[in-house]
Amino acid sequence: MWTIINNTDFKADYQLGINTDPRTRHEYDLIWMVAIKATFCIKPGTRKLSISDEQVEINSTDQFRDDPSTSSLLVASDFAANKQAVDVLLNATAYSQGGKRAEDMLVSFRLGERRKVLKIIGDQFWESSMGMISKSYIIPFDKKEIIYEHAYGGWLEAKDKKLSLYDPSNPSGTGYFHKRSQAHRMKLPNIEYPDFPTKTSLKKNRVAGYGPIPPHWSPRQPHAGIYEPKNRADLNNPYAKNFDPLFYQAAPYDQQFSDINGNEPVGLLNMHPEFSVIEFLMPVIEIECETKMNNKEIRHTATIQTVIFQPDVPQMQMVWQTTLPCKQQGRTIEYTKIYSKIDPNTVN
């Protein structure tokens, strides 16, 4: 029972979950989820990828860098009951080029026709004098991790046992304040959108980054809805009636794609210690599955859910998932066979 017969070069795993689609879910409505993750080596200077000898394992849960209340996600779970779009994530570091330290620089990634540019800035602090607040000088850097701990946001510890304040979009950020007097010697963000430089006004600042957003951060958390059980049927369903599947999108909104079919050009700028530009084409891969359930064989196709770029390595991962409604028949599932079809013109 519950066996994966993997006929690919990639990693695969399964979970039995609860259907969260508000259009189709019913009491005790289960789904069979199978995730397939492919790891590719990126060869700078070429436009092709190669299948890595060491395939990265499936992430069954979210993994945080430190305390989940104050740190960002290191990796997001590869399972999602009902994703509406393809998440594109980057685990990246900004590198100054030519061995020279820089006060600031631009990094970017391009996938297809979409491009996202961020500005990376060296360490600097808010300074206050005579009731005025200004930015200090910038400390040059040669590399800087592009993580939410270096972006706008954070906690403001309360005094006199009053409730602490925090930025719901990024509790792990460099600094958060309501009054200018609270900002003195507070660190400024190292990561910004170029057209949204950090201001002293909270309403004019944006959290910038490429990594996954934890489920308890905004904008994901509001999509979880409000769970208010009113009867026994509600107690049997652990999801709020106004649950929105957008909750499963871990990527920032400007990194969510309607689809990725393969052959899309990819460009990574200033995210590798030796190569300022890395370019290649997305591979063309089809993943087909066959599941035996209730003594019947069901054929189904896995769809791309997540793309993860790791330019430091350099490496790329692609995650497909297939979700099969099984209602009350989860225990009758015997196996899922997985097959892959790879276009050799896009992968070495």
Image: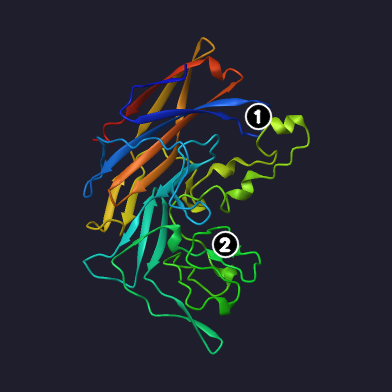
Element assignment for label 1: loop
29 in relation to 244, above or below: above
* Label 1: few (<14), some (14–19) or many (≥20) C-alpha neighbours in 10 Å: some
The total number of labels drawn is: 2
Q: Residue furthest bottom?
A: 130
Residue 122 image position (x, y, % from top left): 36, 70
Q: Residue furthest right?
A: 230
Q: Looking at the rendering, which quadrant does residue 204 occupy?
A: bottom right
Residue 214 image position (x, y, % from top left): 52, 49
State how the image is colored.
Answer: rainbow
Is the Cβ of the residue at disc 2 closer than 8 Å to that at disc 1? no
Residue at point 37% right, 54% down? Answer: 109
Along the viewing direction, whichever of 196 and 221 lies nearer the viewer: 221
Marks 2/1: CA distance? 33 Å
Q: Provide the residue designation for mark 2.
A: 167
Residue 270 image position (x, y, % from top left): 30, 59
* Disc ID at residue 96: none
The amino acid at mark 1 is Arg
Q: Provide the residue designation for mark 1.
A: 25
Which marked residue is nearer to the observer: mark 2 or mark 1? 2
198 in relation to 48, above or below: below
Residue 95 image position (x, y, % from top left): 29, 62
The amino acid at mark 2 is Asp
